[in-house]
Image: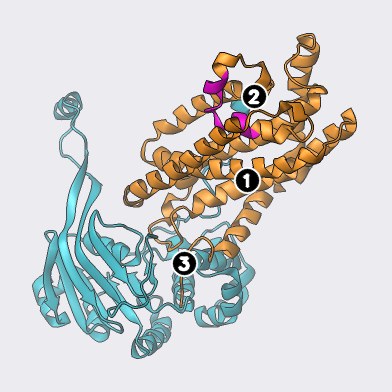
Chain colours: A orange, B cyan
Amino acid sequence: MLRVSIWRSRQALFLLVRRDLSQKYRKLRLGYLWAILEPLGMSVTMWFVFEILLGGRDMGQQPYYLFLTVAILPWWWFTSGISSSTRAFVGFSRTLPVSVLPTQFSVVRVLITRTFDFLFSLPLIVFAMLVTWTFPGINIGFFLLAFLIQLVLMYGLSLLVASWSFLVPDFARIVRIILRAAFYLSPVLYSLALIPDEARSAAALNPLAGILTLYRVGWWPEEHVAMTGYAISFGVALFFLIAGIVTFRRLEHRILKEA
Amino acid sequence: MARTHCDPHLVNALEFDDVSLMMPRTRRRKGGGRSGRLRRLARESSRVNEQVFAGISLAVAPGDSVALMAKDRKADTVELIRLAAGTLVPDHGHVRRRDVVIPILRRAGLINAKLTVRQNIFVVGIMLGMSPDEITERMDWIVATAGLGKSLDGYARSCPPELRRRIVWTVSMATGARAFATQGSLIVGDEGYREIGWAHVEQLKSDGVTFLVAGQNAHVMERFCTRAIVVGGGGVLLDGSVAEALALVGRAQVQEDDDEAVEDEVDILDPRSERDDWRAD
């Protein structure tokens, strides 16, 4: 019997993801190397500005270049994934009336494509470790946990953003502004420890604060925050997952009508 | 619950239970200039929500071949087909299906000219719920039935619309679905190919496959369908024989759909934009 679900369509999903990735890099002479070169350029620029030009201010742990790289890659994954999801239904709206694939198929596809981009860029961390000769300890296991929490957060947010952006085009612009603000409000360039105590509980509501810290504790165990901080981050990620699913379910019939 | 959710224990192939649907439509207005300015001033929107169905209930038994006709607007049958396939969700009520219902709405338009015919077969198959392995397994049948031959690895842009329709039809049939909802796509192609199509759909019909057929001419409806449903004014106007439905709607009103423009390409492989917006930061 023919049955359709994301899981049953996984072969098709990965075929399309593979094609998206090859399309993205095919025309470039350096191909997949761009998955590394672009974040490399970004992290080197940030390092140069904050470490060299601004006189090596104490914004985070040393070596600062590695400190920056470990957080900038997940941040890039987050921002590119959420930005792309604003167009997830817009780009595929013509297929919705004729396709029996689940409506959220295009959102999952965009998310997986961006996740592969992130995974391809991970050798940059190895490069930063070799350059700075700094290696992680046993806490590196938290890196995987942070990855999983971020995936949960991004799936929920992507569903939410994709649904609203399709129905209200202005929403995509609002998302762009929020992402820009989130870059500075999240501990990408700085350590969470630098946030004043009175503002720390508010900062914990930003799920990226806990997630980015978890990515870093493999190298800098002193970055560990209290368990309640992580619990709040995970709770907020879970909240966005539920909010995303509920919003999508409530708006799905409107999305299909407008397609 | 997924929009294409199936209940294998359902007695009927398809059930519409008190289904209501409003659809957004863009209303074309006469007159411009002063009246247009006044409407804009009054913030009068040209987008209106129209009631398409109001509490309709009907059931389609397995193996039924049902002709769908609209008294007023062709769009009503398209929406009924989309509801049946789950590509539209009703505002109120439920649509239950025993098996996946394959919608065949756009024919030539589903083909992407930038891809080869083989790639297009994969794209259409994926959209209709097939896995790449299933498509590979049935490729020989698709190629033979659609008469693709040498054009399999050629670009679809060189395929005439007629061949594009055949590709979509053949891939749809290759899904092995137990129910189809078609808008002008039950029988496609030239005279020779229509005979192949007839033989195939009649074989499926005798095997107990369910069909909802709209957008075909009266001759096709009479030959293939055993039952007809006429919709109009938000409800079911008639549920009876094809002859009764044709008498109600008017034989001349039931025409075969014109195909969409060839340029009407589907973009499952080409998301509108793939820019990286991280640079904004």
Q: Is residue A4 visible?
A: yes
**Residue A178: x percent and y percent?**
50, 26
The segment highlighted magenta reads: A200-211
What kind of element bears circle 3? loop
Q: Mark 3 or mark 1, which has the lower sequence index?
A: 3
Q: Residue furthest toward the front?
A: A227
According to the image, label 2 marks what residue?
Answer: A187
Q: Is residue A156 magenta?
A: no
- The CA distance from mark 3 to mark 1 is 26 Å
Q: Are marks 3 and 2 on the same chain?
A: yes
Q: Give the residue type that dot 3 points to.
A: Val
Q: Work out whether A227 lies above or below B131.
A: above
Q: Residue furthest toward the top?
A: A55
Q: Which mark is residue A148?
A: 1
**Displayed quadrant of residue B260:** bottom left
- The CA distance from mark 2 to mark 1 is 19 Å
Q: Nearer the viewer, mark 3 or mark 2?
A: 2
Q: Is residue A29 visible?
A: no
Q: Residue placed at 39% from the left, 63% from the top?
A: B106
